[in-house]
Image: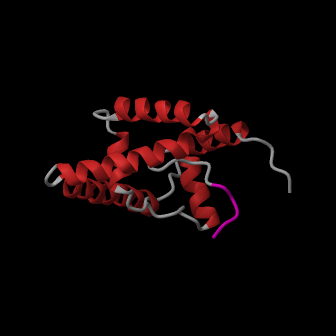
Amino acid sequence: MSSVKHIFSEGSKDPYSRLLQKLIGDAGPKPSKKAAFNLWSKSKSDSAYINTITNRRLKEEGLPKKYRASIRSAVVREIFDQKCKNEEGFEAQWEAYSVEECKDRVARWEQQTSEEVLCSPESYQKCVRFFHTLPAMKC
């Protein structure tokens, strides 16, 4: 594995990032399946409710805001488990969504890593422009 940090995002159409991938021989990590409760927590339906309970718990326990992420994660897990017990097929629905979402991301990743590096003059120019926007690296 390369020590170079990935400066490109998943599914990037930037010619520089694809060239860099080919040069260093590292396509980046293959996307993995996200947990069903994490995908559910990002959905708009219960997001406000989760945030309300998280903020209430922070105040009740007198914790600083730096603990918000860990408290929110615990709240999400509790609510998701509760919904799984109360609603028939809730967990199966979100697990299936998680599998499909992973398949889509893996397909995009495989397509991106198998594409040829663009060799047009316009692509070269984009690479040169992008290179100048990077911070200076110390060797």
Q: Is residue 102 visible?
A: yes
Query: Which quadrant would the C terminus be assigned to in this image?
Result: bottom right
Q: Nearer the viewer, residue 111 or 118?
A: 111
135 in magenta: no
Region in magenta: 1-5
Which residue is at the far right?
A: 139
Q: Residue at point 28% right, 60% down? A: 99
Q: Assign the magenta stretch its main secondary structure.
A: loop
Q: Nearer the viewer, residue 104 or 54?
A: 54
* Residue 111, image quadrant: bottom left
Q: Nearer the viewer, residue 78 or 47?
A: 78
* In the displayed structure image, the side of residue 90 where residue 135 appears, left or right: right
Q: Is residue 14 above or below residue 27?
A: above
3 in magenta: yes
Q: Residue at point 54% right, 54% down? A: 18
Which percent across, then down, holds residue 112?
43, 56
